[in-house]
């Protein structure tokens, strides 16, 4: 189901990774104050280069009744724990735990995006999410743990193809909405993950 208001592009993205690093380095990410969002989380937006262009790594979260993002498409990531020295360390730890990728060894940090305020089931949460962008430099395979149903590499060009633009019907407090999304091989990317993708794409001029 296509949505004419969803992001459209007809130009191929400039997806060389040194250029992406330059764009991210030229912007100071917006931070959400600790007082406004005392809980913290971090995600890893992981790119790898192939002959046909860049790909992004997504996961599909396992189904759990107590998880507000159960079954959603997402980036590897999770809460910043007390033992994590920083949100960056949390993003690296979660990627290793969830998909078996050692980002400290096999990836280069390209930069950080603005903090995103977490929300679930239509409610804003007292949590800020820090998205970190990485370039995978090694060639390891993903290995999903019990928190992840699958890991999926998606070409950036596919996400920018108008054919993948979609919407998700959503109802909250008796009101119905059409939330923007990407539809990729039967999977729907929406919500917080869609929001972070739009931050990334907008910063790079891809939308």
Image: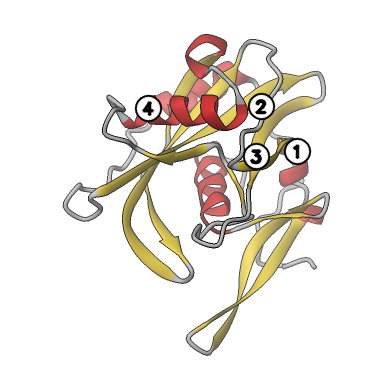
Q: Residues within 10 Å of mark 4 (few under 14, many from 20)?
A: some
Residue indicated by mark 4 = 88
Residue indicated by mark 2 = 15
If the image is split into quadrants, where does the N terminus sit? Answer: bottom right
**Marks 2 and 1, how far apart at CA:** 9 Å
Judged by depth in the image, the label closer to the viewer, 4 or 2, is 4
Q: Position of residue 113 (x, y in %)?
A: 42, 37
Residue indicated by mark 3 = 58
Q: SS at mark 2?
A: loop
Q: Are marks 3 and 4 in contact (CB under 8 Å)?
A: no
Mark 1 or mark 3, which is nearer the start of the sequence? 3
Q: Position of residue 127 (x, y in %)?
A: 32, 52
Q: Residues within 10 Å of mark 2 (few under 14, many from 20)?
A: some
Mark 2 or mark 4, which is nearer the start of the sequence? 2
Instruction: Give the residue at x 63% y 64%.
Output: 180
Seen from the viewer's position, the closer of residues 107 and 62 is 62
**Marks 4 and 2, how far apart at CA:** 23 Å
Instruction: Give the residue at x 47% y 14%.
Output: 104
Q: Which mark is residue 157?
A: 1
Dividing the picture into quadrants, the one containing residue 76 is top right
Seen from the viewer's position, the closer of residues 143 and 109 is 143
Instruction: Give the residue at x 52% y 18%.
Output: 103
**Marks 3 and 1, how far apart at CA:** 15 Å
Q: Which mark is residue 1?
A: none
Q: Are marks 1 and 4 in contact (CB under 8 Å)?
A: no
Vertical comparison of 109 with 71: above or below:
above
């Amino acid at each position: 189901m296509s949505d004419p208001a969803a992001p459209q592009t007809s130009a191929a993205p400039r997806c060389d990774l040194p250029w992406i690093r330059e764009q991210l380095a030229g912007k100071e990410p917006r931070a959400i104050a600790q007082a406004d969002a005392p809980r913290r989380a971090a995600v890893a937006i992981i790119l790898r280069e192939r002959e046909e262009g860049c790909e992004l790594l997504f996961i599909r979260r396992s189904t759990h009744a107590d998880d507000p993002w159960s079954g959603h498409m997402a980036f590897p990531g999770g809460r910043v724990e007390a033992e994590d020295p920083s949100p960056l360390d949390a993003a690296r730890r979660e990627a290793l735990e969830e998909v078996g990728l050692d980002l400290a060894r096999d990836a280069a940090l390209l930069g950080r995006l603005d903090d995103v305020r977490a929300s679930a089931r239509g409610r804003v949460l007292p949590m800020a999410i820090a998205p970190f962008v990485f370039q995978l430099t090694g060639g390891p395979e993903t290995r999903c743990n019990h928190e992840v149903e699958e890991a999926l590499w998606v070409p950036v060009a596919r996400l920018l193809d108008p054919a993948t633009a979609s919407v998700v019907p959503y109802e909250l407090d008796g009101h119905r909405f059409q939330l923007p999304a990407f539809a990729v091989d039967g999977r729907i990317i929406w919500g917080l993950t869609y929001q972070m993708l739009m931050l990334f794409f907008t910063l790079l001029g891809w939308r």
